[in-house]
Amino acid sequence: MKVLASLTFLLLAACTTPHARRTDVLFWNQPQREAAFRAMETHYASNVVHHGKARPLPAGAPVLPRFTDGTTLDTYMAAHHVAGVMVVQDGHIRLERYGLGAGPATRWTSFSVAKSFTSTLVGAALRDGAIHGLDDKVTRYIPELAAGAYRDVTVRQLLEMTSGVRWNEDYADPRSDVAMMYEGVRQPGVPLLVTYMSRLPREFPAGKQWVYKTGETDLVGILVTRATGKSLAAYLSEKIWMPYGMASDALWLKDEVDGTEAGGSGVSATLADYARLGQFLLDGGIANGTSVLAEGWLADATRKHSDIGIPGRGYGYQWWSYDDGSFEGIGIFGQLLHVDPRRHLVIVQLAAWPVATSEAQAKARAEFVQAVNRAVDTQGR
């Protein structure tokens, strides 16, 4: 069997047409970003997330963001290379606008918003009994990690990003972990990402220190796949995309040789389907009349578990949390899925910022969210 597995691996490696390195995306120029973010499947291997019968998102009363400095929506979108914004309140579209040549049928990459997709699938796997509990050791599902720093890390700590394993998430450094995590020598039957992560050293005791690590969400994705016996794309389609009624197929990027999907970054979907995911969460994680997620999962996943050093904010299970009860999936280069249960509100932004992360860009995006909040609070529903 080992010989057969090795031969199969070699044949796959030999027959697969090489794509660009998955982390090359960090170093594309602006024209490359704006062209490729809408067509990631032409650069990387991917799996299809099949959709079902479209759930309507009817038009609601139009609303325009109210910026305090006189900025208009058009100037905001142009200045920050925004490909689309959508505001949904009470299940109705109150704002839908496109830029960069994008439109309703455009699938745009989400980057780390995908982390929140992966987290939601953990909630589904818990309900299904495929994942037994958050205090299980990660090695119960990924035994290849047993010899390294992850041997005593729990599923909960992986979700919280408090494993204590050393990591560098510097998107501008081509030698950082986030740039190198898909590099190295392949071992037959072991995802390349697992091989990379298994060699990382410990920096802090497990559970004591929050450090943002995309590679760990990739591990969560592998854990979900191992537990359920299904690809992330297939499980997302089965649990949410089809029964809740997304209107278009989505894509989930994967390793072209071992087939491992990138749990931390890799979903491409339309603007409206991102909004539908937010609405699914506002609806309590119910699809086609059935509870998809484990009891209490949403409240637990979206509350503050880890202190990130910013007043009023925190980190949950792959969601950024706010003290006012709202929560966000945030991706590099400007992606956003903002969910506000108190206002029954979903805000989506898709973009191609000139840099992966920037305090100035992030501040402008936060001001956009506040401008929407002011508008819906004053203009009613």
Image: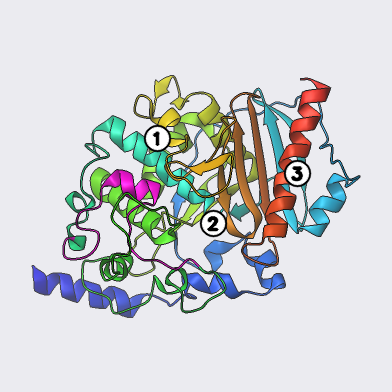
Residue at 10% x, 74% y is 3
Q: Which quadrant: the N terminus?
A: bottom left
Residue at 77% x, 27% y is 376
Farthest-out residue, left: 1
Secondary structure category for the residue under label 3: helix
Is residue 174 at all visible to an observer of this figure? yes
Mark 3 Cα within 10 Å, few/some/many (few <14, many 20+)?
Answer: many
Farthest-out residue, right: 70
Does label 2 or label 3 sit earlier along the sequence?
2
In the visual, does 306 lie left or right of 7? Answer: right
Name the main secondary structure of what is drawn in magenta.
loop
Does label 3 or label 1 sit earlier along the sequence?
1
Residue that badge 2 annotates: 111
- Amino acid tagged 1: Lys
Asked if disc 2 and disc 1 are in contact, CB closer than 8 Å, the reply is no
Q: Nearer the viewer, residue 324 or 317?
A: 324
Secondary structure category for the residue under label 2: loop
> Which tag is nearer the camera, tag 2 or tag 3?
3
Mark 1 Cα within 10 Å, few/some/many (few <14, many 20+)?
Answer: many
For the residues labelled 2 and 3, the Cα–Cα distance comes to 20 Å
> Which tag is nearer the camera, tag 2 or tag 1?
2
Is residue 102 at all visible to an observer of this figure? no
Magenta range is 146-169
Magenta segment: does it hold 151?
yes
In the rendered image, residue 16, in percent from the top left (x then y), is placed at 37, 75
In the rendered image, residue 150, in percent from the top left (x then y), is placed at 24, 59
User: Which mark is drawn over residue 368?
Assistant: 3
